[in-house]
Amino acid sequence: MASRRINPYAKAYSFGTDGSAALAGSLSSIRPLSIAPPRQKQAFAIRAPLWSVIVAVAAAACLFSFLLLGVRSQATEAAKRGNALRGTLAHAEEINGALEVKIAGANDPSRIHAIAQNRLGMTQPAPEQIVRLPREPSAHPGTGTNAAQQEGGGWFRSLLAFFGL
């Protein structure tokens, strides 16, 4: 039995199979009135034309592809910068190694002696050219303080000397 949809004008009458009409809900009705279930509301009921959906999907695909190309180009540029920096670092390490060799050669005592004699014309002094100055008796050899400071200080200094400090 197919259910009929009842519009607002036909709510009062029900038509039987033999063409008779009866009041809906009356005892004389032969068959019961079938009522269509109420429509459920759809969550998303906007219907767009097909061409607009296709254009929106194509635009989203183009946008996604351009974003992907942008990310890939940034990765490529970063790789190029990394390679350039590695080359610069290798060149700087090469220069650093050469300079370390030069520094080691420049600090060689025999090289310094040869330069002093040959280039600058320096010679060893004669014994009569060497003048020895006596040390000051007041200078303390370890700390640079004089004897007057060592002897002064009173009982505290002697207490420290007693304990060996």
Image: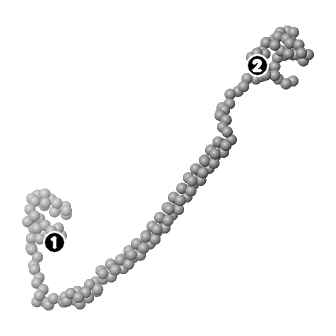
In the image, farthest residue toward the right? 18
Q: Residue at x 85, y 24 (%)?
A: 2
- Per the image, label 2 sits on a secondary structure element best described as loop
Residue 31, given in percent of the width and then of the height, sits at 87, 16
Q: Is residue 138 above or below residue 65?
A: below
- Within-10-Å neighbours for mark 2: few <14, some 14–19, many 20+: few
The residue under label 1 is 141
- Per the image, label 1 sits on a secondary structure element best described as loop
Q: Quadrant of the N terminus?
A: top right
Which of these two is toward me, 24 or 139? 24
Q: Is residue 62 above or below residue 78?
A: above
Which of these two is toward me, 102 or 35? 35
The residue under label 2 is 7
Q: Earlier in the sequence, mark 1 or mark 2?
A: 2
Q: Is residue 87 above or below residue 22?
A: below
Residues under labels 1 and 2: Cα distance?
123 Å
Residue 157, given in percent of the width and then of the height, sits at 13, 60
In this picture, residue 145 sits left or right of residue 8: left
Q: Residue at x 19, y 62 (%)?
A: 165
In this picture, residue 159 sits left or right of residue 18: left
- Single out the mark in the foreground, 1 or 2: 2
Which of these two is toward me, 15 or 122? 15
- Within-10-Å neighbours for mark 1: few <14, some 14–19, many 20+: few
Which of these two is toward me, 37 or 86? 37
- Disc 1 residue type? Pro
Q: Residue at x 50, y 62 (%)?
A: 77
Which quadrant holds residue 100?
A: bottom left
